Image: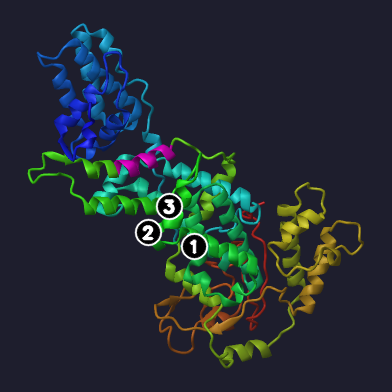
Amino acid sequence: MESILSKQSATVDELVEACIQAFDGSGTLKDTSLVRMFLMMHPWYIPSTDMAKKLVLQSQEESCTAERRTRICHLVKYWISEFPAEFNLSPELADQIKDFKDLLNTEGNESQSQLIDLDSVPSYKWKRQVTQRVPSMSKKRKMSLLFDHLDSCELAEHLTYLEYKSFCKILFQDYHSFVMHGCTVENPILERFITLFNSVSQWIQLMVLSKPTAPQRATVISHFIRVAQKLLHLQNFNTLMAVVGGLSNSSISRLKDTQAHISAETNKVFNNLIELVTSCGNYSQYRKRFSECSGFRFPILGVHLKDLIAVHVALPDWADKEKTRVNLAKAQQLYAILQELALIQTTPPHVDANTDLLNLLTVSLDQYHTEEEIYQMSLHREPRNAPDPKPTMIDEWAVSVKPNADPTIIKKHIEKMVESVFKNFDSDGDGHISREEFEAIRNNFPYLSKFGELDKNQDGKISREEMIDYFMKASSLLNCKMGFIHTFTEATYVKPTFCEHCAGFVSNPTAPPHPLSCSIWICTLSFVSVITGGARLPISQRFPLSGRGDANYLELQPHAAEVAFWEIWEEGNWAR
């Protein structure tokens, strides 16, 4: 018998009848493709409650035989087993089927009633809940909670797990809503997935820009290229696209000094990855590679969403003006795309994810920065090619005025800093820093000398006294700068600006005396705050670019704008 799908169009009633006839009296399904296609796609043409009503009414017709009623019950059973979320998330639909089951029992059709089991339907409500993102007033987040502690393989695996978990929450109704509206309006599940994708790209940009030197930024970029390679190995094309997109963003690609420190081989790898996910030929390279994958594979969802919209725009839902005959060509094309996405949700990645790391990664990805803000960070890192400006009055004053800092105050800060270092990095609690622990510290103090220069007695470990002695000498040699200095320059702003220290309004940020901006920390102080001294940026107002930045503060001595220390925040915010 010729399948109804070979026709160009059919009425909804004809499709319902074809699905009933696809089962025999014993419940064997003869045409799986037809039944799955219609059960998945029917909300495009008729509400699920209306279709359930049609099935119930047909089972109650006088001409309905016991065998036909059994087939209808097998169809309902198959509907529940293949698309359980519909019944869990639609109380009205579930009530209709429960009433149908009760009706069968009342009429003495217990064997048919037993085919219908709604009690086994799992709950999808918890799965569909979207945690609320609480807007941050200061837009500060720890960006590097995991970066220094996970290798490229682990990071790729945990990103894959996190995105796949979010992807599995997406149901047919979300895709349908997106196609019909052309956006994610009233579609929180799909919106959150897209937000996660964008957050990965943004986090990568921020991680690169968190490093103060070009070689350090190049190291971060190279690390993420290795992450991208691992994502390709995992066949996770969606996160691969997010990583490539982040590294290709103008805020990163414009960093010429940084790019110069990336090896030719690494650049070759990255260019190949770009070519793989490029939109050329309607993503032909990606589509070919994706079609060749087996087992777990994670598609670039944005590409397939575009496919859905393209089919929807190109073809009408109905084959006639009266809208009584379903356009089966369109229905089957949409079904092919949606069925592939649904099957991917049934094949999880082979990843042994750590719950704590997933939680930390979620926090790291929860950023609040606009594209413009990130681009401004990029400009601070590597300004556009321009002649160096003449020193301003404040620059000349800061260079000429070099008071002798109080050694007692210096030692106090150093002792507090060293104590916090031991608290956070002396993992075995033996009161000494080993070589391994020292390497972790160097990730946060990029200008720290080699291990041997701190280990004065050469016993293979560093004591508190040795570290204090090192920083005291370094402080003296570097004129109390500790190698971590704020370089203040005059700055003008288009928008109204507030002082990061006194919170005062800079009434005319484009007129002298200009506020002061630190190119490394992106903090703004009013002229008055700097020259009056004693300014300490509280935690709530710090906005450094360093990956470990919110662990530090700026302290200005009277009449000395250049004196600055990195003091570790002792409240446990450094990732171990």
- Can you give x and y, in whole percent of width and height, for residue 313 in the image? 23, 54
Judge whether 545 appears above or below 361 on screen. below
Q: Evaluate if marks 1 and 3 touch, with contact meaning CB atoms under 8 Å apart.
A: no
Q: How many marks?
A: 3
Task: Determine the secondary structure under disc 3.
Answer: helix
Residue displayed at 30% across by 17% down: 27
Position of the N terminus, as image quadrant, is top left
Residue position marked by numbered label 2 in the rendering:
282
**Residue 378 in picture, x, y percent from top left:** 52, 73
- In terms of depth relative to the viewer, which is nearer, 409 or 207? 207
> Looking at the picture, which amino acid does disc 3 mark?
Arg
The span from disc 2 to disc 3 (Cα, nearest Å) is 9 Å
Q: Which amino acid does label 1 sit on?
A: Glu
**Type of the residue with mark 2:** Asn
Percent coordinates x, y for residue 467 in the rendering:
81, 63
Which residue corresponds to mark 3? 287
